[in-house]
Image: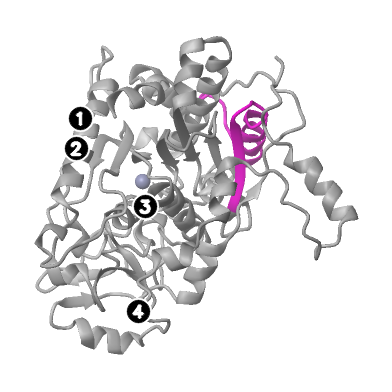
Amino acid sequence: MIKNNTKPHSHSTLEQSSVIIPLTTSEPDPILPPTLQLMKKYDYVAESTTGLSDIQLPFEELQEGVAKYGMLHTPGMPFEEYKEAMNREWIDVTDYDEEPEEITVDITETMNYDIYVETLKKLSRYDGVYLYQIGESTEGRDLYAIEIDMDEDRNNMVFMFTGQIHAREFAGGTFLVKMFADLVQKAQTDKDTMNMLYRNKFVAVPIINVDGREALIKEPEKWKSSGQLWKAYTNGIDGNRNFPTLSWGQVSKGNKLNYSVASKPGFSNYGGRYAGSNKETKAMMKWLYHYTVVEQAECLIDMHQQGAEIYAGKGWGPKRQSHLSVELRDEILSILNAGKTERKYKVVKDEPKYGLTGRGASITDYAFSISAGGKFSPAMGFCVLPNGKKEVLLMQINDMDHAKFKIKAPNKTFKTITIEIGKGAKYLGNSEETRQLLAEEYWKYNFGVLMECLPLIN
Ligand SMILES: [Zn+2]
């Protein structure tokens, strides 16, 4: 297979210029992938913050200010850490030099971190596939994001996928690597698939909790709590409770803290000492902001386990946007359930005020927050709704359709979907039996064609 030469060869240019040319000269930038070129033009901090303050309020003062409406059970993210997250530059680690070769992703085999990285790197040899290092994990492993971006037309529809933010939920990680690898390879010989890829852009962080995955591969017996496999990062913070969303730690008056929020580090549900505290959260915040707001993505599909269920939208969000999410959810549901299977994936309805019970700090909550008009407040340390010179908390209005002011949403048609793959504890972790079950699940429930179907239903 001959790799065509339209892809920029930034490695060789970069090496030459860094050796010969001093940094002070005005040598033009080496050719960057389209996404990184776009990123250079954008001020992520200025665009994403309210711009009303640079100073974080002491937590006690913040609590006093909100006492009339409810409470905050933990402080927000320090502005310095927010700036660091949003200013972080992605490193292009695309393999421009080697020729593409056949990639086989077998769900019945264990995919450890090294195999994962090697697979992504091999995939990035294909034309139109890019690989970025977007941050590091708690234990210092690199976090990777992959893109299928065949042409530079910025009008293409963008579809976002994330997997395995929870350690024991291997399906999302493995499925996404397989979905991306199989689709790119299919396009090499199938013209219709290649044409579809030219019209759409697919992006993913297949494995967010890389440390947790590795821990459960190496020492599954150690990473257990009361017989249950570990979900959180290996430092005991739950990635899906740590995002500085519109509903970060907010509990409206009379509403009890949700049972699924833990007060100390452990196997699941602990949100951290403050919002955005984990390294993985920080890396994901910029990734989410870039595609959701800057590139106006269609949707985020976040893969979890294991209730054979699917969630859509946010109870506290604009009804119209949630309705679009529900429409997409039903289409995806019909794809998953189209096979002749004894069990079906089912719908889960969000609680109406889901976010205001203290647990609305998931990855989909964050993507939904920033798409619907949430801006980062340096004073509070999480997303708020700007109203002129005021910063309005979600608990002041309860849901976004009840604001008495205009909310400016940067991506009004953005949708969020959460898929819980498999059913029952036997689908969790990385045992031989689990891998076998997940391989069957992948084919039975049409995960292998999900990416191709998405552009048709959007
Ligand atoms: Zn999960």
Q: Which residue is mark 4?
A: 52
- Nearer mark to the viewer, of 3 and 2: 2
Quarter of the rendering occupied by the C terminus: top left
Q: Which residue is mark 2?
A: 326
Which class describes the residues within 10 Å of circle 4: few (<14), some (14-19), or many (20+)?
some
Q: Is residue 129 magenta?
A: yes
Q: Relative to the observer, which residue lies in front, 40 or 54?
A: 40
* Amino acid found under the numbered disc labelled 3: Ile
User: Closer to the N terminus: mark 1 or mark 4?
Assistant: 4
Q: Relative to the observer, which residue lies in front, 382 or 72?
A: 382
| Left or right: where 254 falls relative to 406 | left
Give yes or no for contact between labels 1 and 2 (Cβ–Cβ under 8 Å).
yes
* Amino acid found under the numbered disc labelled 2: Val
Q: Secondary structure at mark 3?
A: helix
Which class describes the residues within 10 Å of circle 2: few (<14), some (14-19), or many (20+)?
many
* Amino acid found under the numbered disc labelled 1: Asp
Q: CA distance from mark 1 to mark 4?
A: 40 Å
- Nearer mark to the viewer, of 4 and 3: 4
Q: CA distance from mark 4 to mark 3?
A: 25 Å
Does the Cβ of the disc 4 residue fall within 8 Å of ligand 1? no
Q: Which residue is mark 3?
A: 363
* Amino acid found under the numbered disc labelled 4: Leu
Q: CA distance from mark 1 to mark 3?
A: 21 Å
Which class describes the residues within 10 Å of circle 1: few (<14), some (14-19), or many (20+)?
some
Q: Is residue 73 magenta?
A: no
Q: Is residue 266 above or below residue 120?
A: below
Give the extent of the magenta segment.
106-134
Q: Position of residue 338 (x, y in %)?
A: 25, 16
Does the Cβ of the disc 3 residue fall within 8 Å of ligand 1? no
**Residue 230 visible (yes or no):** no
Quadrant housing residue 114: top right
